[in-house]
Image: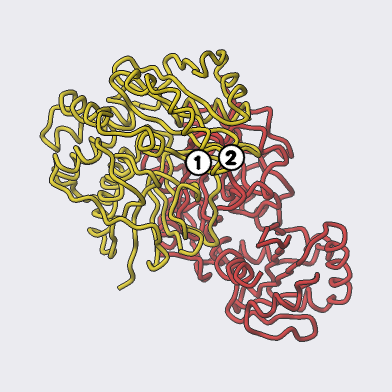
Chain colours: A red, B yellow
Amino acid sequence: MSKTYVFGHKNPDTDTITSALVYAYLKQQLGVDAEALRLGTINNETAFALEKFGFEAPRLTDTVADADAVILVDHNEFQQSANDIKDVLITEVIDHHRISNFETANPLYYRAEPVGCTATIINKLFKEHQIDIPANYAGLMVSAIVSDTLLLKSPTCTPQDIVAANELAAKAGIDLAEYGLAMLKAGADLSDKSLEDLLSLDAKEFVMGDAKVVIAQVNAVDVNDVLARQAQLEELLNNEVATKDLDLFFFVVTDILNNDSIAVPAGVLATKSALAFGVPLVNNQIVLKDIVSRKKQIVPALTNVL
Amino acid sequence: MSKTYVFGHKNPDTDTITSALVYAYLKQQLGVDAEALRLGTINNETAFALEKFGFEAPRLTDTVADADAVILVDHNEFQQSANDIKDVLITEVIDHHRISNFETANPLYYRAEPVGCTATIINKLFKEHQIDIPANYAGLMVSAIVSDTLLLKSPTCTPQDIVAANELAAKAGIDLAEYGLAMLKAGADLSDKSLEDLLSLDAKEFVMGDAKVVIAQVNAVDVNDVLARQAQLEELLNNEVATKDLDLFFFVVTDILNNDSIAVPAGVLATKSALAFGVPLVNNQIVLKDIVSRKKQIVPALTNVL
């Protein structure tokens, strides 16, 4: 029987990991020999969700071309995908991001919707196929929505995400607000993280115009947990810029209680990156008032300026 | 109210024109100020379908950036789209082709499915939105499916297309086989066409590796209607290659009664293009036995070799 891998992006977050598990389950119900994979280390938030609903992390890999086909969830840009993504047949993409640096030789099933979370789309797909979602899988899907929308408070959150989150929380038998805050706090606990960890935890690479850009984001209950170490942080950022030949490393710390962020940029485009938000670069920090979404707020603003 | 244009590819065929009309209608029912447009001349087959179901052709344009947003149907590759496609916000794509040379700055609704015809996907979307399809719009949708699948006989035709075609024919109150053959014959009537017309009628541009390729396809009841004029045809093809700096112009005549094709290639990659099909180039013709689909058979074969 032909083998299909299902996986999300590198530096996996909760939506990427749980959507791989949940969509692999849906495909299995449809008779596909599907296996969920992951392309990187599980973060504290995702570990909390997997533990809560009784799942093991998917198998770790960095190559996928031994499969007959692959399904991408929660991403499409090749630089965020498996290293050998160009060597394998992509039959499906289920995603909620912009489309860029993606192409196929053949027609495929591509389902992107401008909603806050991949799980919200997968919830529809279960209905379209008339397949029930078991309680533990519903729990994973709630976790994804809470994570991507910061408990329904991010500007990426749509009415569809809110409806899906409530529906899935009921199915999972959990209290959405209580569970959601506990999960976010687990993810924002930076006490066991080195600055090196924070840089790579949720870093994504983008090509904007001619510029090579990395945007990393960490959630914190207190942004000073990170910013108290700014001198060391900048040194590490400059190292990354030099090693990876980046034009910009845009490091964002998001305050999950107040829904604001502070960015520390590095690279030749650091000053220009502040312009994207109409604020000055002060102490090499950019204050991002009411900004919490990389996808909806940070990437478009930087893309426009770069 | 913000204006949304809905349009298909350049050198429009029946699926592209009717899907623009039908999807604009669906969006209007959902409260969107949508207008269908076209990027080129209506062919004989499409004119037959529009006439039959009482529609005017959509407004002709080559620029779209005056809209607030656009929706692409039946295509995604920018070189097949409006000239100023990069200057406008793309909010949706409804398509059944591979994805290539397409990107957006923002998340969007992208619905591609590997089925024979865009109308088959739009038929699902009407159901998902619980909106009825009027008989005349159902007629347009049947026309699209007949056109793209050569009356359900092309290898691109899927069980979903067959179900949709029968369902829509019933809704339109027509006999599928009888109407379908009449429409295909109207399109295959080449008597009023110059060779120049035939070259551009359904020509699409592709980038394959480093090669710039145009593939044009015409349907004929008798392929000798075209091939009797091969010497002139080759002269025109070589002109196009020189003018547009192409590596390959792959001209395909498809016999709609026997479901075979013959290709006449021009450009530096002409000999190599025959290799893609495992047959020799004889009299500068490539005999394409059982091949009728540009998308499913010709593009993948050429992409592999180039």
**Location of residue A275 in the rendering, given as x and y in whole percent from the top left corner:** 67, 80
Q: Is residue A97 above or below residue B244?
A: below
**Left or right: residue B53 compared with residue B102:** left
Foreground residue, B303 or B199? Answer: B199
Whether residues under marks 2 and 1 lie with C-beta atoms below 8 angstroms apart, the answer is yes
Residue drawn at 58 percent across, 31 percent down = B267
Residue at x 31% of width, y 26% of height: B150
Instruction: Please name the amino acid that badge 1 sits on.
Output: Glu
Q: Residues within 10 Å of mark 1 (few under 14, many from 20)?
A: some
Q: Is residue B116 left or right of residue A214?
A: left
> Residue B51 appears in which quarter of the rendering?
top left
User: Whole-percent x and y of residue A100?
Assistant: 59, 53
Q: Residue reaching furthest left?
A: B173
**Residue identified by numbered label 1:** B205
Report which quarter residue A231 is drawn in: bottom right
The residue at which mark 2 appears reads as B212
Residue B54 drawn at (x, y percent):
13, 46
Instruction: Name the quarter where the C terminus of chain B is drawn.
Output: top right
Q: Residue B266 is drawn in which quadrant?
A: top right
- Amino acid on which the number 2 mark rests in the picture: Lys
Question: Do badges 2 and 1 share one subunit?
Answer: yes
Identify the residue shown where x is 14% and y is 42%: B53
Image location of residue B23, percent across then percent down: 29, 51
Does the rendering let one see residue A179?
no
Would you call the spot at circle 2 few (<14 residues within 10 Å), some (14-19), or many (20 or more)? some
The quarter of the picture where the N terminus of chain B appears is bottom left
Residue B41's disc is none
Q: Is residue A188 visible?
A: yes
Q: Secondary structure at mark 1?
A: strand
Mark 2 or 1, nearer chain start: 1
